[in-house]
Amino acid sequence: MPSCVEEIRKVLVLYTGGTIGMVKNDDGVYIPASNRFIQKIKSYPELHNEQVLSKYIEGIPEEDYLIMPQIHNRNTILYTIKEYNPLLDSSNMSVDDWVRIVKDIESFYDYYDGFVILHGTDTLAYTASALSFMLEDLQKAVIVTGSQIPIFEVRSDAKDNFLSSLIFAGCYKIPEVCVCFANQLLRGNRTVKFSSCNLEAFNSPNYGPLGIVGINFEVYPNNIAKINNTKTLKVYTEMSKNVAMIQLFPTISADMLIAFLKPPTMGVIIESYGIGNIPSKRADLLDVLVQAIKRDVIVVNITQCCQGTVDSTYETGKILEQLGIIPGHDMTVEAALSKLSYVLGLSLSLTAKKQLMKTNLRGELTQH
Ligand code: ASN
């Protein structure tokens, strides 16, 4: 059962960018601002206490970056913020940025009790999903967070999101990649950004929360992966970039589908209608899919609904399985795409890769 410990805990914060540390430029639009975030954090006594810190930093080389909050007089968290250069709006992030994050976690894994990733919200769910596959047998918490309003603004949600993430990462044994946002702790590969403007920007449509922040911190042991100290972290960085995603829509043509499926594409997520249905009377579309599967392209079926799973309830869904399309169960599109990128990067047979796509690897899907 995850528990709060009473000792000094160390957390590494990787600051990749996002609104959390943005300021407006001369044109009045938000851009990332280097070397401002740490300074601002140091101005909050609850996030950094110089006097208490001085008791602990002797002999620690990176003292400039060590900051310490005291949480309810119970736990003390020493943390280091590693600011990336350049800081990015998360819309500009790609597979290479995922690789950089996991390599940093790997390098510092033994030195810290947990990790916080500060990230823009736009592609945060993709990164959280990707990290969950790239970090196998993770035994420490990796908490991804950000904010909808920059930390420099009066109504910012940044400080609460950051503080809660530090506490989850430092004080609780949660061996998973999670998203902590607006007082909710969600499984990373179950999370989607569902609002561009609410402070509650994320939800987890097909899986319950891992924890909540109220007057007390609560974690739900039944929803959290189990610690297994016999396992050691394995890091995967060979992610395929040849993956695509296409949502079905009534005016789709065979040519449009061909464009998505042509080489070098090796895997495609099809966002089908409802519970996994495609237009079964459209022989032109079905033929394009069959040709792609014959070329060993892995095609995975995901619902385009905000919530739910795919199955073969209807003739229009059954046909997908008959064609050799893999059911993606209740994976989010973010999880399905990043999992496909991960699976295609593994040195395995095509059959084994297809099998992995329908198997639950990191709690990302529910198998019935
Ligand atoms: N565009 C920003 C980003 O994803 C949005 C945010 O962080 N709230 O970096």
Image (cartoon, grey):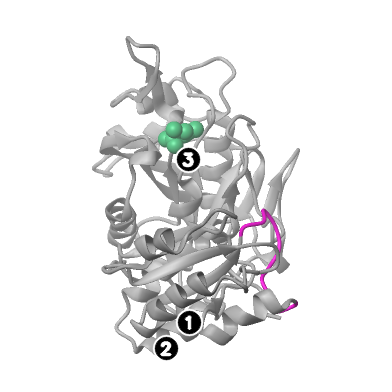
Picture disc at residue 356 = 1
Q: Is residue 75 visible?
A: no
Badge 2: residue crowd in 10 Å (few <14, some 14–19, many ≥20): few
Nearer to me, 230 or 282 = 282
Q: Is residue 96 visible?
A: yes
Check whether the beta carbons of the residues at disc 2 and disc 1 lie within 8 A of each other: yes
The three-letter amino acid code for the residue at tag 2 is Ala
- Label 2 belongs to which residue? 352
Q: Residue at x 36, y 23 (%)?
A: 39
x%, y% of residue 323?
53, 84
Q: Residue at x 47, y 59 (%)?
A: 253
Work out which quarter of the rendered image holds the C terminus and state it. bottom right
SS label for mark 2: helix
Magenta stretch bounds? 304-313
SS label for mark 3: loop
Nearer to me, 340 or 41 = 340
Instruction: Give the image quarter of residue 197.
Output: top right
Label 1 within 8 A of ligand 1 by Cβ: no
Badge 3: residue crowd in 10 Å (few <14, some 14–19, many ≥20): many
Label 3 within 8 A of ligand 1 by Cβ: yes
Majority SS type along the magenta span: loop
x%, y% of residue 26?
32, 9
Q: Quadrant of ligand 1?
A: top left
Inspect the magenta stretch and tell me whether residue 312 lies in it: yes
Compared to residue 264, the image places residue 248 above or below, namely above
Q: In 3D space, how far apart are the residues under numbered discs 2 and 1 (Cα atoms)?
A: 6 Å
Mark 3 vs 2, N-terminal side: 3
Mark 3 vs 1, N-terminal side: 3
Q: In 3D space, how far apart are the residues under numbered discs 3 and 1 (Cα atoms)?
A: 27 Å
Q: Residue at x 32, y 24 (%)?
A: 33
The three-letter amino acid code for the residue at tag 1 is Leu
- Label 3 belongs to which residue? 122
